[in-house]
Image (tube, rainbow, N blue to C red):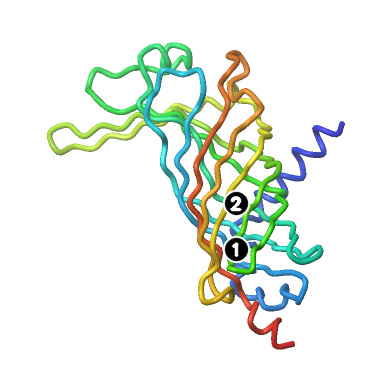
Amino acid sequence: MKKCLFVLFFMGIGFHSHSQVLISLLFGDKLNSPGMEFGLEGGVNMSSLGNMDGNKRLSSLNIGFYLDIRLNDPWYIYTGLLAKSRMGLSNLSSGDLDFLQSEEYAEPGDYSQVLNYFIVPALAKYKLKNHVYFEAGPQFALMHKSWVEYKSDVDGKDARIRDYNKDMINRLDVGVTAGMGYRLMKGNGMTIGVKYYYGFVDVYKDRSGTKNNSLFLKMNIPIGAAKAAEK
């Protein structure tokens, strides 16, 4: 029952993810206060999967929103939602494709496992006076779409084929994240940072050791924080 409620919670978030980003832009200043900062998080992540032959990280863009909640200086809680985020692996081998029951085409090309997640971090954040911060804690994710993607470029002709394999994937992913970053403009501007994620749950139902791991390069853009500070 708890697992079902957890899935429904993430699904509800997912259905409204695009509207939430729009709301963030329009009403972000209303959601800020002296004890909480609200804004957009965007960036790129380079991900991989354990116990697979593929040897190339999958790169993708992320976008979502964040909440930076003050507990007691210098401690904060960092959470939010990455509404658009992918993990996976590129350069899959013939053995990988056989395990995934995915067709291997005659024309040469690159095969990737693509996993679309809604991601919610729950990190403890420690801010130094020099505007550097450190953060660590659990991260939760719900897979809502996945496929093996074949891409080729032969004689100037591009091909892209998706073989959906959602039924092979565990929908829930849980792991730990740790990172650091720096806030620009003497602690009043955007934040740039890096974090690393390691999953504890096997991605595939029928193969152990297939854990997600990903390096995130991110930028946080506060919305309306200056107005909140003035108030």
The quadrant in which the N terminus is found is top right
- The single residue placed furthest to the bottom in the displayed view is 230
Give 83 or 66, whichever is nearer the viewer: 66
Q: Where is residue 147 in the image (x, y as percent from the top left)?
A: 48, 30
Relative depth, front residue between 140 and 130 = 130
The circle drawn on residue 21 is 1
On residue 89, the disc is none
> Whole-percent x and y of residue 151?
31, 32
Determine whether, in the image, residue 222 is placed left or right of residue 230. Answer: left
Mark 2 neighbour density, 10 Å: few (under 14) some (14–19) many (20 or more): many
Label 1 environment density (alpha carbons within 10 Å; few <14, some 14–19, many ≥20): some
Indicate the quadrant where residue 37 lies.
bottom right
Residue at position x 67%, y 78% from top? Answer: 29
Q: Which residue occupies the extreme front position in the image?
A: 129
Q: In which quarter of the view is residue 30 placed?
A: bottom right
Q: Pick whichever of labels 1 and 2 is earlier in the sequence.
A: 1
Residue 53 locus on image (x, y percent):
41, 18
Residue 109 % position (x, y):
26, 27
Q: What residue type is labelled 2?
A: Ala
Dot 2: element: strand
Q: Left or right: 220 with respect to 141?
A: left
Cα distance in 3D space between marks 1 and 2: 8 Å
Q: Quick check: marks 1 and 2 in contact, CB under 8 Å?
A: yes
Q: Residue at x 69, y 40 (%)?
A: 140
Numbered label attached to residue 83: 2
* Horizontal relation, residue 167 to residue 159: left or right: right
Q: Identify the residue shown where x is 63% and y is 18%.
A: 205
Question: Mark 1: which amino acid?
Answer: Val
